[in-house]
Amino acid sequence: MSPTGSYLEIDGRPALRFVREYAHPAERVFGLLTDPAELAHWFPATVVAPDWSPGATLTYTFETDGDGGTGTVLAHDPPRRVAFTWEGEELHFEVETLRSGHTRLTFTHLLDERDAAARNAAGWDLCLDALDATVEGTPAAPEGGRTPDWEQVYEAYVAAGVPSGAPIPG
């Protein structure tokens, strides 16, 4: 496995960005970002989302650790954009239909701490690999925690100079 994300700063805030392309319509990809049953196949926590309107509250739960905190929907514009917070950090998903008919997904995670970049990037890489499988109809939930795959990707991010140093659970 190799890292697919990039580190950047947006308005002085540390951020991660991932871009994926799918041979599926935007509506299919967008549904995987907002349907809790689909999120269960790739997102790192169970998401309870009774409503996706801006300002609505989301609840996150981890299978092993329980409480994953809460978030707030920032934007919801099907099938182009959804953004929400998770414990103060922002997750932005932009869905774009390409001329080829394929769909480009751009995911940007605005971080609170610069040193969390490599740790979080490695986790998102594994989650987005699970999203890739889900889009293709072969869902496989990502393994949580510090797995050998995660460690390999994390070390690659660190070697590439992505900020690191935040505590690593597990």
Image (cartoon, rainbow, N blue to C red):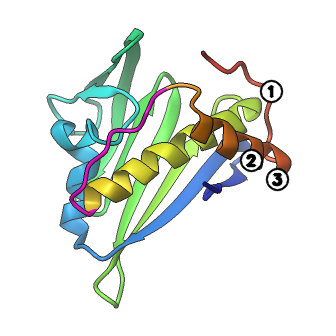
Magenta: predominant secondary structure element?
loop
Q: Secondary structure under badge 1? A: loop
Which quarter shows the N terminus?
Answer: bottom right
Confirm or deny contact between disc 1 and disc 3 (CB under 8 A): no
Please state the extent of the stretch shown in magenta in the rendering: 136-144
What amino acid is labelled 1 in the image?
Gly
User: Whole-Å distance between the Cαs marked 2 and 1?
Assistant: 12 Å
Confirm or deny contact between disc 2 and disc 1 (CB under 8 A): no
Q: In this view, does 75 lie to the left or right of 4?
A: left
147 lies above or below 169: below
Please report the residue visible at 40 percent of the width from the left and 15 percent of the height from the top: 69
> Does residue 127 appear in this view?
yes
Task: Tell me the residue that label 2 is attached to.
Answer: 157
What amino acid is labelled 2 in the image?
Tyr
Q: In this view, does 29 lie to the left or right of 158?
A: left
Task: Tell me the residue that label 1 is attached to.
Answer: 165
How many numbered badges does the structure rendering display? 3
Residue 121, disc: none
Q: Is residue 74 left or right of residue 4?
A: left
In the rendered structure, which disc, 2 or 1, sits on the residue that comes first in sequence? 2
Question: Where's residue 90, x and y in %?
Answer: 50, 37
97 lies above or below 5: below
